[in-house]
Amino acid sequence: KRLLKHLDSLRGDPESEHRILHNNTVGSLFAVDATMARGEIAYREGKYDEAFKCLRKAVRMQDELNYDEPWGKMQPIRHALGGLLLEQDHLDESEAVFRKDLEYHPKNPWAMAGLISCLKRKCGRNCCGGCGDSSSNGGESDSKDMEAEVVELEALYKAQRDSEWADYPVTVACACCAPR
């Protein structure tokens, strides 16, 4: 909460609207960070509706930032939103969040880890062996497609994480998520 107060004070400084980081004002970047921080704090306080409202707003705010490379806001907020939705079993929205993130950032390991976890849970919490129960997941054909997608994603993820460029073990969608 101290960080949040600090972000709010920095954001309130008139200079933050005149200072530019890449193509965005520092104030607009702080506004995204503060909204995300509010969401994560609310989540840890058990205020899930408030948390998800803030995180969804932070995603919209991040999407509205001016385009730049590298990104002015380096952490995709969808990772936190999708991961925390997944923790609370909001599987459909979590899946949609990770898929959208992968449209923006293909092969991002954080979003891939989140989507893999989400699909496995949707597949019957025991995918790749437990997906054949057509009564609980929309049909055997759907579960086979989902199982095939999980296998494909896991292969992509493994190849990426086995590369010499992978420097950090990514096991959850966001560092704010509980490890599985």
Image (spheres, rainbow, N blue to C red):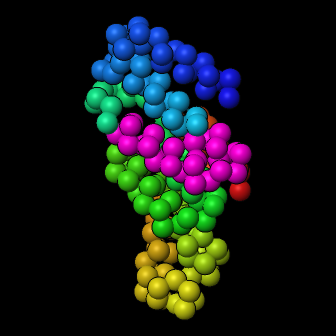
Which residue is pictured at 47% across the width and 11% down the height?
13
Q: Is residue 121 above or below residue 160?
A: below
In the rendered structure, the answer to whether residue 4 lies left or right of residue 26 reads right
Q: Where's the N terminus, which quadrant? A: top right
Q: Position of residue 87 (x, y in %)?
A: 64, 58
- Vertical side of 23 occupied by 96: above or below: below
Left or right placement of residue 95 versus residue 37 in this view? left
Residue drawn where x is 47% and y is 85% of the image: 138
Magenta residue span: 39-63
Q: Where on the picture, by quarter, is residue 38? A: top right
Specify whether residue 161 is in view.
no
Does the magenta portion include 41? yes
* Residue nearest the viewer, comparing 116 with 98: 98
Question: Along the horizontal axis of the image, is 87 left or right of 107?
Answer: right
Q: Percent from the top left, x then y, of residue 33?
A: 51, 30
Q: Is residue 167 magenta?
A: no
